[in-house]
Image (cartoon, rainbow, N blue to C red):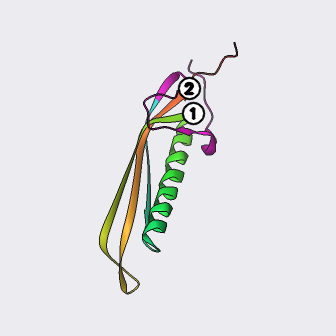
């Protein structure tokens, strides 16, 4: 089916690290989707949490643009860069990158 699929609302997109969505069948592979988030200030824990949120928001937005129902085979990568100079002190930045495969899922059929 080549019907136009409207952009998905980002909060409804499933994100899974597995290659399939349990109980669902993949209809079409849309392509690779990525997201990135950076955080420079605050505590280490807060930097990680902030960078993850920014990356996830970017990731969901990009998947939504493709019209994805889900993103499968998701990989999270976290890195820190020491020695970032900011506002007269040395800090450590945190970067989170997320990648996966955007897909559409076949509609569920009631038995």
Quick check: 32 left or right of 4?
A: left
Residue 14 within the segment the image draws in magenta: yes
Q: Secondary structure at mark 2?
A: strand
Seen from the viewer's position, the closer of residues 10 and 80 is: 80
Residue at (54, 46) in percent of width and height: 60
Query: Mostly what secondary structure, the magenta segment?
Result: loop
Residue at (49, 67) in percent of width and height: 46
Residue 24 pos. (x, y %): 55, 23
- Total count of labels: 2
Residues drawn in magenta: 1-29
- Specify which label sits upstream in the sequence, 1 or 2: 1
Instruction: Give the Cα separation between the discs numbered 1 and 2.
Output: 6 Å
Residue 32 pos. (x, y %): 41, 38
Residue 93 within the segment the image draws in magenta: no
Residue 102 pos. (x, y %): 48, 35
Q: Are marks 1 and 2 in contact (CB under 8 Å)?
A: yes
Q: Secondary structure at mark 1?
A: loop
Q: Quadrant of the N terminus?
A: top right
Looking at the image, is 49 positioned above or below residue 83?
above
Looking at the image, is 23 positioned above or below residue 78?
above
Quick check: 78 left or right of 111?
A: left
**Circle 2 residue:** 105
Residue 83 pos. (x, y %): 29, 75
**Circle 1 residue:** 69
């Amino acid at each position: 089916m080549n019907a136009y699929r409207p952009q998905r609302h980002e909060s409804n997109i499933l994100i899974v690290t597995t290659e399939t969505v349990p109980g669902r069948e993949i209809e079409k592979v849309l392509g690779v989707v990525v997201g990135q988030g950076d955080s420079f200030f605050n505590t280490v824990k807060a930097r990680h949490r902030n960078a993850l949120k920014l990356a996830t928001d970017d990731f969901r937005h990009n998947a939504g643009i493709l019209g994805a129902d889900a993103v499968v085979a998701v990989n999270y990568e976290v890195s820190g860069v020491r020695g970032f100079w900011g506002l007269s002190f040395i800090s450590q930045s945190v970067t989170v990158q997320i990648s996966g495969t955007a897909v559409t899922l076949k509609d569920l059929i009631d038995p």
